[in-house]
């Protein structure tokens, strides 16, 4: 019915996830024996026993939908329905998407969170702090590809210390993110007895970091700390210690300074929020 539904369906197809489109309606209100209000979630994923309702409206315009959803949950507590907001879809498409919607539905930056000068100032502060904390040592900076490249390039030059620089690359697979991380490229340097600083562009759920901390600890370093440019702590699922944070960010899709949407925008010198295109109005069904 709607381009975003098509895109979501394509995404499910691509990952071989079975779904049914609008297989069931849930009656919510009756006038005598006649149903006068019902709710028909867009997708059902039988293997997960999970319904999804997609909304491309802005979050503050979905009160009506939210009300319906609340009723469904009250009246059918055994049914799992999740509402995917426009921003959830954006996040999904940004990470796993492809095709027309992920190409044309964004216009770039909605607003700048941290301009170039602010970013550079903060990186210099972090560099100075690390220089002080690691005085007399030669730490190993380990960047997690790919988003980290811009931050790493600036941070290492803001540190007035001998440092070694390494990169790791990981991949996510399967449905349970926490159990499904693989290291594709490992560090080349021997880490035994070394002071390690994991460098990240952003920590979101923290699941990547939890895995990495455990993975690197097993190599017997003298210490492991984390330095991230951005911290989206509102989305944290794993309790991970973070020693150095550039900025705290809100729960929005952030781009620039290494962070991408569908592979683009990494080279913006500032950090901003992604601008989605206002979807065209579609007739109510
Ligand atoms: C980002 C970021 C972290 C991870 C954090 O990488 O660089 O590695 O996500 O997410 P988490 O806290 O929810 O685990 P991404 O997978 O976007 O890859 P990229 O750096 O290549 O863009």
Image (tube, rainbow, N blue to C red):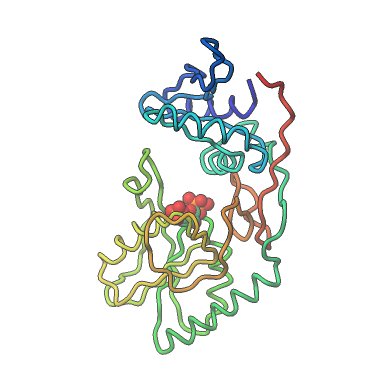
The answer, for residue 140, to whether it is visible in the render is yes
Q: Nearer the viewer, residue 17 or 260?
A: 17
Counting from the top left corner in percent of width and height, residue 5 is at: 59, 26
- Residue visible at 58% across and 61% down in the picture: 249
Q: The N terminus is located in which quarter?
A: top right
Counting from the top left corner in percent of width and height, residue 173 is at: 38, 41
The answer, for residue 145, to whether it is visible in the render is no
Of all residues shown, which one is farthest toward the top?
A: 33
Of all residues shown, which one is farthest toward the bottom?
A: 136
Vertically, is 267 above or below 38?
below
Left or right of 272, for residue 138: left
Q: Nearer the viewer, residue 74 or 185?
A: 74
Counting from the top left corner in percent of width and height, residue 129 is at: 51, 82
- Residue visible at 68% across and 21% down in the picture: 284
- Residue visible at 72% across and 39% down in the picture: 277
Quadrant of the image occupied by residue 224: bottom left
Q: The C terminus is located in which quarter?
A: top right
Quadrant of the image occupied by residue 85: top right
Vertically, is 213 above or below 92?
below
Q: Nearer the viewer, residue 125 or 249?
A: 249
Q: Report the label total.
A: 0
- Residue visible at 44% across and 62% down in the picture: 167
Left or right of 201, for residue 48: left
Vertically, is 179 above or below 83?
below
Counting from the top left corner in percent of width and height, residue 128 is at: 54, 83
């Amino acid at each position: 019915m709607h381009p975003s539904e098509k895109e979501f369906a394509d995404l499910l197809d691509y990952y071989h996830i079975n779904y049914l489109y609008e297989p069931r309606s849930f009656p919510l209100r009756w006038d005598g024996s006649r149903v006068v209000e019902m709710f028909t979630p867009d997708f059902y994923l039988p293997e997960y026993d999970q319904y999804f309702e997609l909304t491309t409206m802005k979050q503050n315009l979905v009160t009506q939908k939210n009300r319906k959803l609340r009723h469904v949950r009250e009246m059918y507590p055994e049914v799992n329905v999740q509402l995917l907001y426009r921003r959830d879809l954006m996040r999904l498409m940004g990470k796993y998407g492809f095709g027309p919607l992920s190409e044309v539905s964004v216009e770039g930056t909605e607003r700048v969170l941290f301009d170039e000068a602010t970013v550079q100032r903060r990186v210099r502060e972090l560099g100075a702090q690390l220089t002080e904390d690691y005085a007399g040592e030669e730490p190993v900076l380990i960047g997690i590809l790919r988003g980290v490249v811009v931050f790493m390039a600036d941070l290492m030059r803001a540190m007035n210390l001998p440092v070694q620089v390494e990169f790791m690359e990981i991949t996510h697979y399967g449905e349970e993110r926490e159990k499904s991380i693989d290291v594709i490229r490992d560090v080349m340097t021997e880490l035994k007895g070394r002071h390690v600083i994991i460098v990240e562009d952003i920590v979101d759920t923290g699941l990547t970091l939890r895995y990495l901390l455990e993975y690197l600890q097993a190599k017997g370093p003298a210490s492991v700390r984390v330095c991230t440019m951005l911290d989206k702590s509102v989305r944290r699922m794993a309790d991970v210690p973070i020693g150095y944070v550039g900025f705290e960010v809100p729960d929005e899709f952030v781009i620039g300074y290494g962070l991408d949407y569908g592979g683009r925008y990494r080279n913006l010198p500032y950090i901003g929020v992604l601008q989605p295109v206002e979807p065209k109005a579609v007739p109510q069904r």
